[in-house]
């Protein structure tokens, strides 16, 4: 005779009262929902490996691992949408991986590289960068479900995204690997630069996302796109520090254009709202005018 209380792990536990013997069955998880999560875990492994090589002093390999994690982070979301395998679990896993890959790992790399010469001040700068990355990711998770956001707002990030912040904040190391002499002011400049990038991540600066780019490619542009992608990765592997330096500077220079584009969208919405209000006001003609009160209706204001 079975005990009247069932273990939560008992496969013969009834699902609800009145239906004894009913086994709880879980639906098999589609493979299309597992693939994006596996890519996210691979990116997390790359971020953790970057921390290891930074501790060992192999900064070139650590930077390569961060770039690899950023590439995987840009791929997993597109693959999830392509396979229709998006899930809440995947979104939370992606945020946790981004915090490690693009918040903790870059901060530690900068600290082990040069910020440690500033003692506690350098550690505070690295810590502030990691905290700002976490705050930026938390704000993104909250704002993504905002029903009041206009449709065009999906083309922009609020603040610099964490992967771009990680690639951008490592610019001083790229410059050193180009062979430029290392001066005594490098550490203080790196500290200020790190804090600026951290502030950009938590700011409300509109940054063009580019998420909707690459969803459709015209047939006559397929081969040129292949050539451009292959050429880019060939240059990145052959001249990594030159490509990363020029790409980071170009990205920083493009930030004002995203803000200007956002202002144009806002201005368009304001003009459309003003036009709608004018049209509604024009519809109230003489037929809709309120007739003047008659002498019999004149009463003390307190009675109205």
Image (cartoon, helix red, strand yellow):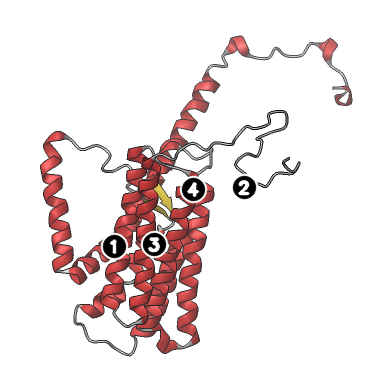
User: At which x and y percent is residue 69?
Assistant: 33, 61
- Lower position in the chain sequence, tag 3 or tag 1: 3
In the image: residue 91, left or right of residue 296 = left
CA–CA distance between discs 4 and 2? 23 Å
CA–CA distance between discs 1 and 2? 41 Å
CA–CA distance between discs 4 and 3? 15 Å
Task: Report the disc number at residue 9.
Answer: 2
User: At which x and y percent is residue 165?
Assistant: 38, 64
- Write down the residue under mark 3: 44
**Secondary-structure class at tag 2:** loop
In the image: residue 6, left or right of residue 287 = right
- Lower position in the chain sequence, tag 4 or tag 1: 1
CA–CA distance between discs 3 and 2? 31 Å
Task: Report the disc number at residue 89.
Answer: 4
Front-most of residues 48 and 25: 25
- Lower position in the chain sequence, tag 3 or tag 2: 2
- Write down the residue under mark 1: 68
CA–CA distance between discs 4 and 1? 23 Å
**Secondary-structure class at tag 3:** helix
Above or below residue 81? Residue 96 is: below
| Pair 3/1: label in front | 3
Label 3 Cα neighbours within 10 Å, binned few <14 / some 14-19 / many ≥20:
many
User: At which x and y percent is residue 268?
Assistant: 41, 37
- Lower position in the chain sequence, tag 1 or tag 2: 2
Front-most of residues 297 and 227: 227
Q: Are marks 4 and 1 in contact (CB under 8 Å)?
A: no
């Amino acid at each position: 005779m079975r005990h009247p209380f069932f273990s939560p792990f008992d496969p013969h536990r009834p699902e609800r009262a009145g239906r004894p013997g009913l086994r709880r069955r879980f639906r098999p998880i589609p493979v299309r929902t597992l693939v994006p999560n596996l890519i996210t875990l691979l990116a997390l492994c790359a971020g953790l490996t970057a921390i290891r090589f930074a501790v060992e002093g192999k900064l070139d390999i650590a930077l390569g691992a961060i770039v690899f994690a950023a590439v995987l982070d840009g791929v997993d979301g597109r693959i999830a949408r392509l396979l229709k395998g998006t899930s809440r679990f995947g979104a939370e896993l992606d945020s946790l991986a981004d915090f490690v890959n693009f918040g903790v790992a870059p901060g530690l790399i900068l600290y082990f590289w040069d910020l440690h010469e500033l003692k506690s001040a350098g550690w505070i700068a690295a810590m502030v960068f990691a905290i700002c990355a976490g705050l930026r990711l938390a704000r993104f998770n909250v704002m993504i479900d905002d029903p009041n956001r206009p449709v065009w707002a999906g083309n922009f990030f609020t603040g610099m995204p964490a992967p771009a912040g990680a690639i951008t904040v490592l610019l001083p190391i790229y410059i050193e690997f180009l062979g430029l002499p290392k001066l005594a002011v490098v550490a203080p400049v790196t500290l200020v630069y790190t804090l600026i990038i951290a502030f950009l991540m938590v700011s409300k600066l509109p940054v063009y996302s580019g998420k909707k780019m690459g969803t459709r490619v015209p047939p006559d542009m397929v081969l040129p796109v292949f050539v451009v992608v292959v050429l880019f990765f060939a240059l990145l592997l052959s001249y990594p520090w030159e490509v990363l330096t020029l790409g980071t500077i170009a990205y920083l220079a493009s930030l004002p254009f995203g803000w200007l584009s956002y202002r144009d969208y806002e201005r368009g919405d304001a003009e459309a709202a003003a036009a709608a209000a004018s049209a509604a006001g024009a519809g109230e003609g003489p037929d809709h005018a309120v007739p003047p009160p008659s002498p019999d209706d004149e009463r003390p204001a307190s009675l109205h």
